[in-house]
């Protein structure tokens, strides 16, 4: 079988190459994939979890977490972001940021999220694009709520996020400079928010994170600004694409939609199954810190190692009937929020809460919701994204 797991055009046409990934899981779960440089494609659930939980062997900092290579000066700059750090520095930073994502903080957002969903759906009628009218605004509203930012800012946050993530998609990126320029705008925006909260503290995550922790440690200005940058991308893109990809999955499996309509409480397990099925983040890169063996393959220090969550989440060694979309699946040991370890998704509870409430409300309010056109996929091997999904809300 011809193997090419990074061709962005195939993702734009049909999403992740599941046929290739299934072949690799069965025949070469750790596969030397050609590229510039070559890399090890890790596709089994067991191996992806192992890589994820051993930061001392598979570094996020040496050559960063994103797939594409960067010049050394950019690598040094990007290491300031939590996504591109290893313990113990990552542990210190994460412990400070965790203060804004306690179960109590997230639980207090439930009614806000329910109100946001109601407001979005109140504004929808007839034929709409599910992505731009529902899936994209939901996490943007929630991010604005978290940050205490004006809701009117959601449109520019949406644009910045698209430009940073959609660099390889002609609908989002108009030039190679757009992504870095958008990142700088988010950085300046975060700096402005922090300055406002220092002058006028409020009951929001910004005020919490700019204050010292109980032991006196605190995020410096750069660390806070970079966290907001990460939140704008990770908190927006993943939930947005899980929501739109989940809606597409329900259209493709109408029996599951009927189950949800008959029992909206299934939205609790549906949220996890949607994340498993969609795997909003397709891959992350790590770099081997020493010579080691993985999946029977000899990996050398500084080799590029890429984990594919889209593959791990359909591994038949872990999931019964993994090619079946089952909104009642339980247990569901998916790794759509990462395979554990240092970089397990900080906002996983928030994302599942947003998805649960959204699909519960959709099932109750629009039981005859129908797709009216083809879905349009994002041209990206990093984010499994949907750009357009025409629907009729009735």
Image (cartoon, rainbow, N blue to C red):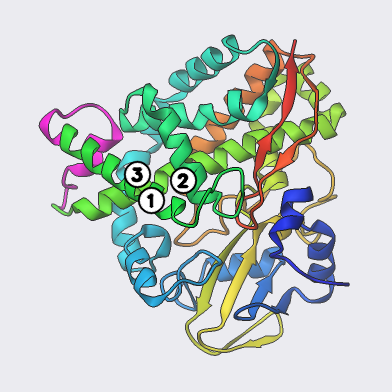
Q: Is residue 54 placed above or below 330 in the rendered structure?
A: below
Is residue 189 visible in the rendered structure shown here?
yes
Q: Secondary structure at mark 1?
A: helix
- Please tell me whether residue 209 belongs to the stretch shown in magenta: yes
Q: Which label lies toward us, 1 or 2?
A: 1
Location of mark 3 (residue):
186
What residue appears at the point 45 percent right and 69 percent down from the top-left corner? Answer: 64
Q: Earlier in the sequence, mark 3 or mark 1?
A: 1
Residue placed furthest toward the front? 175
Q: Mark number for residue 181?
A: 1
Residue in front for this viewpoint, 160 or 286: 160
Q: Position of residue 295 (x, y in %)?
A: 70, 79
Marks 3 and 2, how far apart at CA: 10 Å
Q: Nearer the viewer, residue 158 or 358?
A: 158
> Which quadrant holds residue 392?
top right
Magenta span contains residue 19: no
What residue do we see at 75% from left, 40% from top? 329
- Residue 111, compared with residue 270, is above or below; it is above
> In which image quadrant can residue 5 be found?
bottom right
Residue denoted by label 2: 233
User: Quick one: label 3, few (<14), some, or many (20+) residues within 10 Å?
Assistant: many
Quarter of the picture containing the C terminus is top right
What is the x, y in percent for residue 43? Answer: 71, 67
């Amino acid at each position: 079988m011809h193997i090419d797991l990074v061709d962005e055009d195939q993702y734009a046409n049909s999403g992740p190459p599941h046929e290739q990934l299934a072949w690799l899981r069965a025949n070469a779960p750790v596969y030397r994939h050609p590229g510039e440089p070559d890399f090890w494609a890790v596709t089994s659930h067991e191996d992806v979890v192992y890589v994820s939980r051993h930061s001392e062997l598979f570094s996020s900092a040496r050559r960063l977490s994103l797939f594409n290579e960067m010049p050394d000066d950019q690598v040094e700059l990007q290491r300031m972001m939590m996504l591109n750090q290893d313990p113990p520095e990552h542990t210190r930073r994460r412990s400070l940021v965790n203060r804004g994502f306690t179960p109590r903080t997230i639980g207090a957002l439930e009614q806000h999220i329910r109100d946001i969903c109601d407001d979005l759906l109140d504004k929808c009628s007839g034929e709409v694009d599910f992505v731009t009218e529902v899936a994209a605004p939901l996490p943007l509203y929630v991010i604005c709520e978290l940050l205490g930012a004006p809701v009117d800012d959601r449109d520019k946050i949406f644009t910045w996020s698209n430009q940073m993530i959609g660099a390889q998609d002609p609908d989002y990126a108009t030039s190679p400079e757009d992504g870095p320029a958008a990142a700088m705008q988010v950085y300046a925006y975060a700096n402005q928010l922090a300055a406002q909260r220092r002058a006028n503290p409020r009951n929001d995550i910004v005020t919490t994170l700019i204050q010292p922790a109980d032991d006196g440690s605190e995020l410096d200005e750069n660390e806070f600004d970079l966290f907001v940058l990460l939140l704008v991308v990770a908190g927006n893109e993943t939930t947005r694409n899980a929501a739109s990809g989940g809606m597409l999955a329900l259209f493709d499996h109408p029996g599951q939609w009927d189950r949800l309509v008959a029992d909206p409480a299934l939205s609790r397990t549906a949220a996890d199954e949607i994340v498993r099925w969609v795997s909003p983040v397709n891959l992350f890169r790590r770099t081997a810190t020493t010579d080691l063996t993985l999946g029977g393959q000899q990996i050398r220090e500084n080799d590029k190692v890429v984990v594919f969550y889209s593959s791990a989440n359909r591994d038949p060694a872990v999931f019964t009937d993994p090619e079946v979309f089952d909104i009642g699946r339980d247990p569901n040991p998916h790794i759509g929020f990462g395979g554990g370890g240092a970089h397990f998704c900080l906002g996983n509870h928030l994302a599942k809460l947003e998805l649960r409430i959204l699909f519960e409300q959709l099932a109750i309010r629009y039981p005859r919701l129908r797709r009216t056109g083809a879905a349009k996929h994002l041209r990206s091997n990093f984010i499994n994204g949907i750009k357009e999904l025409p629907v009729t809300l009735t």
